[in-house]
Amino acid sequence: MTATATTPRSGTEDAWREGADNLLLNCAALKPGQTVLVINEPAVWAERPAIEFIEARARVLGGKVQSVWTGRPSGPDAIPAELSAAIAAADITIFNHMMGAMLRFRPLAGNGVRILNYATTGALLESDFCRVPYGVWTRASALIAKEMNAARRWRVTCPLGSDIEGTVPESERVPAAGTNADGFALRTFPIGTHPPKSSLAASGRIAVRWLVSSSLFDIGSQGMRLDDVIHLEIERGRIRRIDGAARTVAQAKDFLEAIGRKRGKEGLIVNSWHIGVNPQAFSPWRDTDDLEAWMNLAHNNPRMLHFHAVGDAIPGDISLPLIDPTVEIDGRAFWDKGRSTLLDEAPFRALAAEGRDGARAFALNAAIGV
């Protein structure tokens, strides 16, 4: 589907209500009397008026809200014990915080609903990205996962010269226990990607313009935007050579190796990839504004695929974004130059048609900040 998504509306709280209720009622399934723990991070992408509106709306809907603003731990094992206990005890925990990203691949104690929330600004809350009913995307995500789980071989190309292919391990054809269709141990709002596919047996070339933290740990920086495009020559998941301007090549290689040393891993490994599946996703920030804020939103859009680097464990500590990729699964194009052709197929058309506004669920918003 190639329609263009609508732009944010009015910037007023009245325009935020539908997105907030989609989060609280459709994603969190909030019931009156439930405890709602909202964990917030002082960051450029966490706008206090929008977050306070979500909290106030949760109270109107009957939730018992506890709001916490706190800094970022060094990693998932460094979350304060008191806060971990509060997460375990809460009926619902909403992470407007990179702590949610740190925990997205880890099982959590307790039985509550945990949500990594991307709707952390007014512009996001009132956008179609956050207003399309959450149930549409849980069903779409399950359909996408079914297609991806059947994959045997993949190939990724991009306009800057990426061309890499690999096979899918048998273990990746069965969803991991305790995860959602997107591969995460918690819910994401809105849903934006699929479980990572291993590239440890892959070979080819990846064009790189950015090296960005994958937010699993605090690496001490957001990453870097390179002055020139470089090309990583990959052989069975290992970076064997880097081509490009000598200074930029050295900068990237030193960065990956330094992160590897810091984390006790081999830095020159590209272990997996996944691509955005939600064409309504957009980024209010450009890559030149704030790398973390940009990547956090843009990676949910089909215009961005990212590989994970550093270490054998999936995912790695660094993300390597590609823009407008083409992805072939067993010889069939699922994404074509940044557009999801998969969403054009009959099951997805039928799903979109069920919604109140029909095809807008899968309309493309090309505004990903580059």
Image (spheres, rainbow, N blue to C red):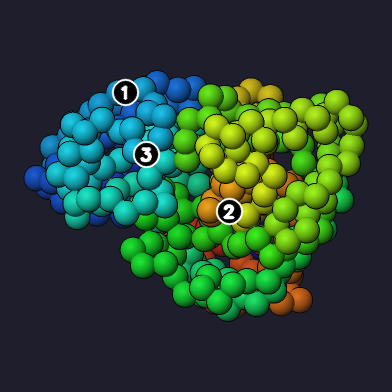
Q: Using the rendered image of the protein, determine whether residue 87 is visible from the camera's viewpoint.
A: yes
User: Residue 76: which disc?
Assistant: 3
Residue that appears at 30% across and 23% down: 69
In the image, residue 203 above or below residue 53: below
In the image, residue 126 above or below residue 339: above
x then y, percent, for residue 206: 79, 50
> In the image, 292: left or right of 175?
right
Residue that appears at 64% across and 23% down: 289
Q: Using the rendered image of the protein, determine whether residue 206 is visible from the camera's viewpoint.
A: no
Residue that appears at 34% across and 47% down: 115
In the image, residue 1 above or below residue 64: below
Question: Disc 1 versus disc 2: distance between alpha carbons?
Answer: 31 Å
Q: Identify residue type, mark 2.
A: Asp
Q: Which residue is mark 1?
A: 70
Q: Secondary structure at mark 2?
A: loop
Choose top left, top right, bottom left or bottom right for residue 63.
top left
Q: Nearer the viewer, residue 144 or 22?
A: 144
Q: Which residue is mark 2?
A: 312
Q: Identify residue type, mark 1.
A: Thr
Q: Nearer the viewer, residue 370 or 275?
A: 275
x then y, percent, for residue 360: 55, 56
